[in-house]
Image (cartoon, helix red, strand yellow):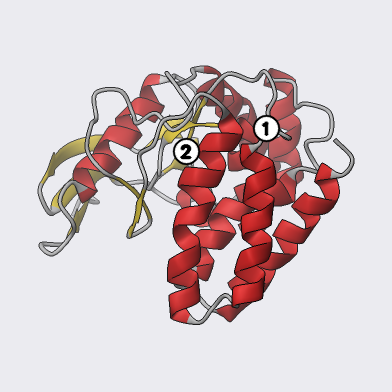
Amino acid sequence: MDAPTHHVKANPHAPAGFFEAEAAGLRWLAAAGGARIAGVREVAAGRIVLERIEHASPTRSAARAFGRDLARTHAAGASAFGARPDGWDGPLFIGRRGMPALVRDSWGAFYAEARVRPFLAPALAAGFLRADEAALVARACTVIEGGTFDDDAPPARIHGDLWGGNVLFSPGGVVLIDPAAHGGHPETDLAMLALFGLPFLDDALAGYQEAADLRPGWAERVPLHQLHPLAVHAAGHGRGYGVALADAASAVLRLAEEY
């Protein structure tokens, strides 16, 4: 019997627009012509049908090619920091959690307001973040939104939830799934890869730098760009993420003293 050619995800209780947002993000990323993206076969309320991705063992060459392709996806750009995928005006999600759809003129203002602060109250309510730690993160957000880390990089077309589980190695190379796509900073995707791990990450970064210049100091800014995924996880995945979030905020405040 032939192997199935599609993969169905369904949840009749999913929030309105949940699977439609996923489809819009996948199509927007695919339109960049960079990293290969899982194809959308159909989408409706509570249901999405995707191409089935055959798995293969990770290789250095596939990781390096993925890095080059990801740089091209980022370079396709977005209309603004926080911009939704083209043609989509509904809600945004990261995993199963809602994500603010706010557009701002500067990356720092967008990132602090829409990608870090919104997850602090849920993390506090869950007991995974202490009040003093939340205050520390809030201090870091004030520094970020003040423009300390802003540069002249235009809004990039980022995946937005680029942890290793959403990076599939297939016989034809890497394929990306489950985005939280929006206009952001390219270093955010790279920092998330570093946070949760990717086979042959060094090769992927080398490939990225073959296609795009990483700005001086990008490695030191990894904690800055990890604030978002750590805040999301601190809101629902355990106390350890609250500790890691506070540690990253401390690193950001130390780094700000050098800018």
Give the left or right position of residue 149, taking residue 92 as reference.
right
In the image shown, does 11 or 170 lie closer to the viewer? 11
First reached walking from the N terminus: tag 1 or tag 2: 1
Residue type pointed to by label 2: His
Q: Residues within 10 Å of mark 1 (few under 14, many from 20)?
A: few
Asked if the residue at tag 2 contacts the one at tag 1, i.e. Cβ–Cβ closer than 8 Å, the answer is no
- Image mark for residue 191: none
Circle 2 sits on which residue?
159
Q: Where the N terminus falls, by quadrant?
A: bottom left
Secondary element type, mark 2: loop
Residue type pointed to by label 1: Gly
Q: Is residue 85 above or below residue 111?
A: above
Question: At 78% from the left edge and 52% from the top edge, which residue is drawn?
Answer: 253
Give the left or right position of residue 240, taking residue 202 as reference.
left
Circle 1 sits on which residue?
147
Please say whether residue 146 is visible from this viewpoint. Answer: yes
In the image shown, does 115 or 194 lie closer to the viewer? 115
Question: At 70% from the left edge and 29% from the top edge, which residue is drawn?
Answer: 207
Q: Position of residue 51 (x, y in %)?
A: 27, 41
Q: Position of residue 58 (x, y in %)?
A: 60, 49
User: In the image, which is nearer the foreground, mark 1 or mark 2?
Assistant: 1
In the image shown, does 168 or 73 lie closer to the viewer? 73
Q: Where the C terminus falls, by quadrant?
A: top right
Q: Residue furthest right?
A: 258
Secondary element type, mark 1: loop
Q: Residues within 10 Å of mark 2 (few under 14, many from 20)?
A: many
In the image shown, does 194 or 148 lie closer to the viewer? 148
Q: CA distance from mark 1 to mark 2?
A: 23 Å
Q: Position of residue 82 (x, y in %)?
A: 44, 33
Q: Position of residue 210 (x, y in %)?
A: 73, 22
Residue 70 placement: quadrant = top right
Question: At 18% from the left edge and 60% from the top edge, which residue is drawn?
Answer: 14
